[in-house]
Each structure stands twice: as C-alpha cells, then as structure tokens.
C-alpha cells in the first residue's frame, strides 16, 4: 500500500510510522529523518538541509521531491511505501500524484494524526531534538498551518483522507490506525476521475 502520513510537528507521525511499517511490512521514508541525516554532508542537498531545518522552514519542493521519487523507484518500494513528512505542500502533492500515476500505483490512504495544540507543545518541549528549540517549533507549527493544512482538503476531495485521534498511548493510537488500514483495501486501478 502507498500511504501518506500528515500531522503537525509532535503529532506522533514517526512513532506511528514505525508501527505501521512493522504491521504492513512495507518500506518507510521519513523525509525529516533523511534530511537530518544529510546535515553534515558537504553536498548541495546537505547544505540546504542545514539551512532550512535549523530555521524550521521547508526545503524547496523540487529538492525534496527529487529525493522522494528516487527512493520510491527503489525495489524495496515496489510493493508500497509509507511516506512520513511528504508531501507537505500542495505542489508536492501534485508532483507525487503525477509520479504515482505514471507508475500506476496510486495512493491508497492518507492518514491525518490529530492532536490538540496544547498537547503538541508539551510533547515537543519534552522531545529535545536539534530542531525543537522554542523558536523553531513555533515556526514549524506556523509552516504546518500555512503550507500543509491545505493538503487535507486536497485529499478529502479525493476521498483518501482519514482522520485519526492522536491522543492516548502510542498503542492506543496505533489500534485506531490499524482499523483504518484494515478497512481500506489497496486500489488496483487508477481512478481516472480522482
Ligand atoms: P516534524 O513533522 O516533527 O516537524 P520532520 O522530521 O517531519 O518534523 O521534518 C523536519 C524538517 O525537515 C522540516 O521542518 C523541514 O525543514 C524538513 N522537511 C521534512 N519534510 C519536508 C518536505 N516534504 N518538504 C520540505 N521540507 C521538509
């Protein structure tokens, strides 16, 4: 299955993505983890990762989609992939649609993890990742609201969006996700009207 995970910083995408990957046995790509791993590289992408991640800003759409599509073309993704952190803008979603339609492997499911803002801030404060300083967190929440939230409507219109309550323990949240995955069978044909 090809699944997209959407949620604000701190919603638990990384934790749940891990569990979903184990459950389905498919590949997993976290663009955030991947970009963080490039931060020490002396390459143009490494330089962009340093610049944008530390500021809490999104990298240019073309840079990130290039990385993602290269990954999706690898053999390990032939049966599907869980995308965690991509797409994050409408432009990225359109590029992904184009790519997947060409591959004849349309998206099966978009999972949105919903957590209220107070809880998000609490979780982010307790996490202490390099880009979790108070100013960067604030910026990332703003960027999410401005750039990523419009994606929900984009996918709702395509009947792909499922909203999951992200409160509770990781296992409680995962049970909700599992029910949702079990209820949606993989689409074998491209829906031309989508
Ligand atoms: P979170 O969702 O917790 O904010 P991520 O680990 O998903 O964190 O992403 C961290 C950072 O990586 C983002 O703030 C951004 O700088 C960069 N990034 C990740 N995914 C993308 C993307 N799809 N487009 C542009 N930048 C991205």
Image (spheres, rainbow, N blue to C red):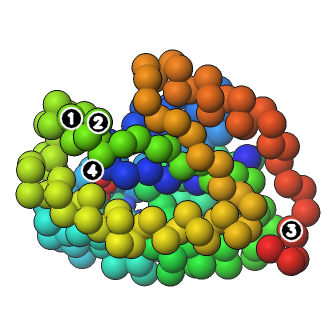
Whether the residues at callouts 2 and 4 have beta carbons within 8 Å, the answer is no
Residue 148 lies, in percent from the top left, at: 43, 66
Q: Residues within 10 Å of mark 3 (few under 14, many from 20)?
A: few
Query: Does 69 sit above or below residue 128?
Result: below
Instruction: Report whether residue 136 is seen.
Output: yes
Residue tagged 2? 119
Reply above or below: 11 against 25: below
Q: How far apart are marks 2 and 4 (CA)?
A: 27 Å
Q: Which of marks 1 and 4 is nearer the N terminus?
A: 4
Q: Which of 94 and 151 is in front in this view?
A: 151
Instruction: Examine the image and state in which quarter residue 19 appears.
Output: top right
Residue appearing at x 39%, y 72% in the figure: 147
| Residue of label 1 | 122
Identify the image quadrant of the C terminus. bottom right
Whole-Å distance between the Cαs marked 4 and 3?
34 Å
Q: Marks 3 and 4: in contact by CB < 8 Å?
A: no
Mark 2 or mark 4, earlier in chain: 4
Cα distance in 3D space between marks 1 and 4: 25 Å
Q: Nearer the viewer, residue 91 or 153?
A: 153
């Amino acid at each position: 299955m090809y699944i997209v995970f959407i949620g604000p910083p701190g919603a638990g995408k990384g934790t749940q993505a891990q569990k979903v990957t184990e459950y389905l046995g498919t590949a997993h790509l976290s663009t955030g983890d991947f970009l963080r791993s490039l931060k020490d590289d002396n390459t143009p992408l490494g330089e962009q990762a340093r610049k944008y991640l530390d500021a809490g800003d999104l990298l240019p759409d073309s840079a990130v989609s290039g990385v993602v599509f290269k990954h999706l073309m690898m053999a390990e993704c032939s049966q599907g992939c869980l995308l965690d952190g991509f797409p994050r803008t409408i432009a990225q979603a359109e590029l992904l649609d184009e790519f997947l339609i060409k591959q004849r492997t349309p998206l099966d499911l978009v999972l949105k993890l919903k957590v209220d803002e107070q809880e998000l801030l609490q979780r982010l404060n307790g996490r202490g990742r390099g880009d979790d300083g108070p100013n960067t967190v604030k910026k990332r929440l703003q960027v999410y609201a401005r750039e990523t939230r419009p994606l929900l409507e984009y996918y709702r219109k395509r009947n792909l969006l499922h909203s999951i309550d992200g409160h509770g323990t990781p296992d409680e949240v995962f049970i909700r996700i599992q029910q949702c995955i079990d209820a949606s069978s993989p689409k074998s044909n491209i829906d031309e009207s989508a």
